Every structure is written in C-alpha cells, then in structure tokens.
Image (cartoon, helix red, strand yellow):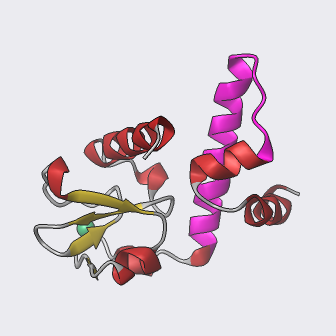
Amino acid sequence: MNSSDIDAHEERWQAVLARDASQDGVFFYGVGSTGIYCRPSCPSRRPNRLHVSFYLTQTEAEQAGFRACKRCHPNMISQQSRHQALVAQCCRLLAAEGEQGQSLSLQALAKKVGVSSFHLHRLFKTHTG
Ligand SMILES: [Zn+2]
C-alpha cells in the first residue's frame, strides 16, 4: 500500500464519520464484525475503524463476502447516480487542484477516484459534454 492509498482511506473514513451523502455511490464500506456493507451516509452507528474496509463498487463488497445493509440499501444505488457522484467528485478534485495552481491529468484523476481513465473520459462526455 502506498501513501496515496492511505490518504484515500483516511478521506473515505472521514466521509463515513461525517455521513457524507455526497460520497454515496463513490464508495462503500464493509464492516468485518457484522458482515454488512453500507453507503457512507448510512444512519447506523459508526463502526470501529479497525473493522472497516472500503470498496468502490457494490460488486466488490459482495465479492468480499459482505451483505447489503438493510437500513441504507447500498445495493439500490443505481449505476446512473454512481456515475453522477463520480463526476461530481472529479469536479471537486479539479477545483481543489486548480486553487493550488496545479492541474490534474485524466490518469491521475482516474486513479484518485478508482476508475480507469478510459471509463472516466466516457463518463465526463456523457455527464458534462
Ligand atoms: Zn447501512
């Protein structure tokens, strides 16, 4: 695991603590002690971080053996809203980088949000034109 992975985990964990609904669909978290996975805004009690793992898709979480939470229904997030969440997240990242006078390449951006640059390019075309 390199340091940018650790940063991404820290950001995701902070989003979970804040029940950040803008991160719904961007990632999911699984709780090892319960075998359940949730969206970040789930109203349930915050888990112990030691038991938490992060997944970018519902499929990944399910393949890791987690079941969808009955409270926040992470499996009900549509592909469409997941894509919109990704695009919104990219826009925020781009705006933040712009303020620092840096520009983020499509590849770097794709890596940050955990999708392929090809996929991201297509998403941007579809959602922002
Ligand atoms: Zn939940």
- Res 37 quadrant in image: bottom left
Residue occupying the point 70% across, 43% down: 108
Where residue 106 sits: x, y (%)?
Answer: 78, 47
Asked if one can make out residue 122 in the rendered structure from this viewpoint, the answer is yes
In which quadrant of the rendered view does residue 85 lie?
bottom right
Give the residues in magenta: 80-106
The one nearer the camera, 71 or 63, is 63
Q: Quadrant of ligand 1?
A: bottom left
Please name the residue shown 64% across and 37% down the image.
93
Q: Position of residue 81 (x, y in %)?
A: 58, 68
Q: Is residue 76 magenta?
A: no
Nearer the observer, 25 or 21: 25
Q: Residue at x 64, y 65 (%)?
A: 83
Position in image of residue 67 (x %, y %): 26, 82
2 with respect to 38 (left or right):
right
> Is residue 84 inside the magenta stretch?
yes
Residue at the front extreme of this rendering = 1
Chief secondary structure of the magenta span? helix
Q: Is residue 125 left or right of residue 44?
A: right
Q: Quadrant of the C terminus?
A: bottom right
Q: Position of residue 41 (x, y in %)?
A: 33, 56
Q: Is residue 88 visible?
A: no
In the current view of this chain or complex, which residue is farthest to the right?
129
Q: How many marks?
A: 0
Please identify the quarter of the rendering in which residue 68 is found: bottom left
Q: Is residue 12 left or right of residue 77?
A: left
